[in-house]
Amino acid sequence: MKLSTLTIAAGLALSGATALAQGVTDPQIAAIVVTANQVDIDAGKVAETRATNADVRQFGRMMVTSHAGVNKQATELVTRLKVTPENNPTSQSLKSGGEMNVAHLQTLTGAEFDKAYVDHEVAYHQQVLDAIDKTLIPGAANSELKALLVKVRPAIAAHLQHAKMLQTSLEGKK
């Protein structure tokens, strides 16, 4: 699968997942949050070991650390609230798309890997922001869950901007 096709497919999968997420429950939102973070942790781990550009490698490391922190907060919250994350079509779609992305990234090396990883991070973080804004925050019934989503939103937006900056930097090195 070509990079542009993969990026578009990942974006469409997450867009479709967002549409499926309409009317989600708090347990489903919890599963979506944990899965979305895990997808980025998994891709970041690949970037830590395969990226040739030091900035891309550092970004991957930051994604692992940052998204693991969000998952820790989410897990602590749902444990305290006695909410069991409920697998749903959106979380399943995210997991499947993440696995496909990691499998694709593992076939790439050098600058091709760096570009594919960063392009995916831009598309993925934009879609996650859209899901947070249009579905997850409005759909969260529990005020603490909603507050966590509101709290992590600026970090996701910052990740998107950082990924866009890397994308521009890599394009300048052609």
Image (spheres, rainbow, N blue to C red):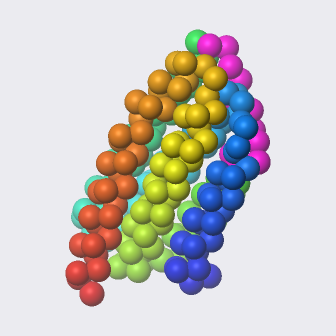
Q: Is residue 30 placed above or below 143 in the rendered structure?
A: below
Position of 54 with respect to 6 (left or right) is: left
- Give the tally of numbered discs: 0
Name the residue furthest bottom. 174
The answer to which quarter of the image holds residue 169 is bottom left
Residue positioned 52% across, 18% down in the render: 144
Position of 150 with respect to 145 (left or right) is: left
**In the rendered structure, which segment of residues is drawn in magenta?**
81-92
Instruction: Inspect this view and state whether residue 174 appears.
Output: yes
Query: Which is more toward the observer, 68 or 120?
Result: 120
Residue 142 screen position, x and y as percent: 60, 19
Position of 58 with respect to 38 (left or right) is: left
Instruction: Inspect this view and state whether residue 30 appears.
Output: no
Residue 153 screen position, x and y as percent: 42, 39
Q: Is residue 115 placed above or below 151 in the rendered structure?
A: below
- Is residue 90 within the magenta segment? yes
- Is residue 151 within the magenta segment? no
Residue positioned 27% across, 64% down in the render: 165
The answer to which quarter of the image holds residue 60 is bottom left
Residue 161 screen position, x and y as percent: 31, 56
The answer to which quarter of the image holds residue 48 is bottom left
Position of 170 with respect to 60 (left or right) is: left
Quarter of the rendering occupied by the C terminus: bottom left
Residue positioned 34% across, 61% down in the render: 163
Residue 97 screen position, x and y as percent: 64, 60
Query: Which is more toward the observer, 100 or 83?
Result: 83
Residue positioned 46% across, 54% down in the render: 125
Quarter of the rendering occupied by the N terminus: bottom right
